[in-house]
Amino acid sequence: MTENIMSQLDPIFKATSIAFIGASNNKSKWGGMVLNRLLESDYAGEIYPVNPKESEILGKKAYADIRDIPGKVDLAVFTIPAAHMPEVMKNCVEKGVKGGVVISADFAETGETGRQLQNDTVRIAREGGLRFVGPNGNGVWSSAVKMNLSPMPDWIPGSLAFISQSGMFGGAALRASLLQGIGISKFIAMGNQGDLTAADYLEYLVDDDDTQVIAIYLEGMKEGRRFLETAQRVSKKKPIIILKGGCSEQGARATLSHTAS
């Protein structure tokens, strides 16, 4: 299982080429803000903005469709409306993309319509062999390839992997890590856990050479039994620190509307 999950998630955390679907010249929008952070980072791979309305975005040639990109694409980042996700995910599968980061919101956390969009997107991705983070998160950061796909500035590389089910909590914790000089190997805003779950990330991080300690802010469980068994196994090799939110009645209502947990 570990070897399999490594091959599935390496296209995300060790991507050599990234397509940014929903890229924008407007840095106040998610599609401009996160792309700009990626361009400001020390990421050395290929970057392909995708937007049918633009020919150039933040100094990079833009493509109307991911299938128009001439080279290989390891990872697709999505900042498009949820309603377009199933169709665009099909295009990514056709292109041969194996990893995704879905920042887009308005999925299962909003009700039945969003839940169906999320289910359709997950089904298409899994049938095509594409694994993705999210939806409804605020990105990832990986020291392995110096890749920043979040609205936050670059962090100090180090040995702590931080998985957060809240983008705001994750951002606050990471700012604190900067102030205290704590280095980060991976940051993962897992959002709704539509495809990849907390257990999958533990399976991956246990054999990640850059990670020595794993911290998790968790609002809700998916595959609870598997998570428990995986955490028990992983903790024998690397310590795991968990802060569990949503434990009170009021907190449970909040997490349901926040990440469909």
Image (spheres, rainbow, N blue to C red):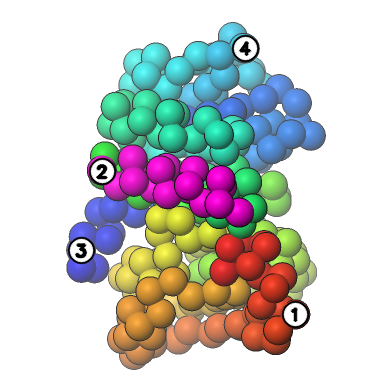
Q: Residue furthest top?
A: 55
The kind of residue on which mark 1 rests is Gln
Is 26 included in the stretch rendered in magenta? no
Label count reads 4
Give the alpha-carbon distance from disc 3 to disc 1, as whole Å: 40 Å
**Residue that badge 3 annotates:** 3
The crowd level at tag 4 (other Cα within 10 Å; few <14, some 14-19, many 20+) is some
Give the alpha-carbon distance from disc 2 to disc 1, as whole Å: 37 Å
Q: Earlier in the sequence, mark 4 or mark 2?
A: 4
**Residue that badge 1 annotates:** 250
Instruction: Say if mark 3 contacts mark 2, CB within 8 Å.
Output: no
- Check the picture and name the quadrant holding the C terminus: bottom right
**Residue that badge 2 annotates:** 127
**Residue that badge 4 annotates:** 54
Is 124 included in the stretch rendered in magenta? yes
Q: Earlier in the sequence, mark 1 or mark 4?
A: 4
Q: Which of the 4 image quadrants contains residue 16?
A: top left
The kind of residue on which mark 3 rests is Glu
Q: Position of residue 134 (x, y in %)?
A: 51, 53
The relative height of residue 171 versus residue 78 in the rendered view (above or below) is below
Q: Earlier in the sequence, mark 4 or mark 3?
A: 3
Q: Residue at x 63, y 67 (%)?
A: 256
Q: Residue at x 55, y 52 (%)?
A: 112
